Amino acid sequence: MAIREILQVGDKRLESVCEPIKKIDKEVLELAKDLRDTLYNCDGVGLAAPQIGVLKRAILINLRNGSEEILLFNPKITKQSGNEKDYEGCLSYVMHEGEVVRPTSVTVEGMTIEGQRMKYEAKGFLARAFCHEIDHLDGIMYMSKAEVMYELVEE
């Protein structure tokens, strides 16, 4: 198992624009495994490759409510509509939340681990997760979009 350290705010790699994945090779398969191992070892619902120090365009989302796992390479939002303000957190900025306006509906296209093109029509929380993780691939952290930030306190 390859559980990787999740980079935290302040690490310059989180501010980097990631490179596209051109082919599914051994390195990309290992990245996919590392994303899975790392995400399922914590409480998050999504993880992007730069959060584990790999500057490639790959995301993993699993809302963990019986929904399917989504592993996508070179994801791109091709359509969006609506706006909704809600709370967001991030594995790269623990113990904080912010109120962020995101689209309520998005269409996302990308490549599967089998190298096939895939399209997702997402609404609500899944749409928010796609937007959040894809922002990571462009070096954008949710705090820069937050209207208000909160520091969480352990009880």
Image: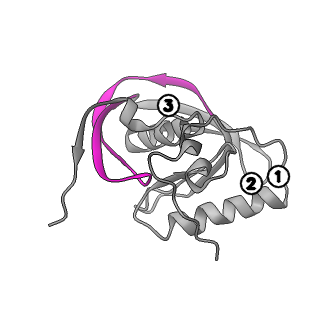
Membership of 58 in magenta stretch:
no
Asked if the stretch drawn in magenta spans residue 97, the answer is yes
Where is residue 51 drawn, in percent x and y?
55, 51
The answer to whether 99 appears left or right of 114 in the picture is left
Residue named by callout 1? 24
- Region rendered in magenta: 76-102
Q: Amino acid at mark 3?
A: Val
**First reached walking from the N terminus: tag 1 or tag 3:** 1
Picture residue at 76% right of the left edge, 61% below the top:
29
**Marks 1 and 2 in Cβ contact (< 8 Å):** yes
Residue 113: numbered disc: 2
Counting the numbered discs, the total is 3
In the displayed structure, would residue 8 be above or below residue 35?
Answer: above
Image quadrant occupied by the C terminus:
bottom left
The disc placed on residue 106 is: 3
Q: CA distance from mark 1 to mark 3?
A: 26 Å
Instruction: Examine the image and state in which quarter residue 143 appears.
Output: top left
Q: Quadrant of residue 113?
A: bottom right
Number of the label disc, if any, that sits on residue 39: none
Place of residue 86 in the rendered image (x, y in percent of width and height, measured from the top left): 28, 37
Asked whether the residues under the numbered discs 1 and 3 touch, taking CB atoms below 8 Å apart as contact, a structural biologist would say no
Q: CA distance from mark 2 to mark 3?
A: 21 Å
Circle 3: is it few (<14), some (14-19), or many (20+) Cα within 10 Å?
many
Which amino acid is tagged 2?
Answer: Ile
User: Which is the main secondary structure of the residues drawn in magenta?
Assistant: strand
CA–CA distance between discs 1 and 2?
Answer: 7 Å
Residue drawn at point x = 18 percent, y = 58 percent: 153
Which quadrant of the rendered structure holds the N terminus? bottom right
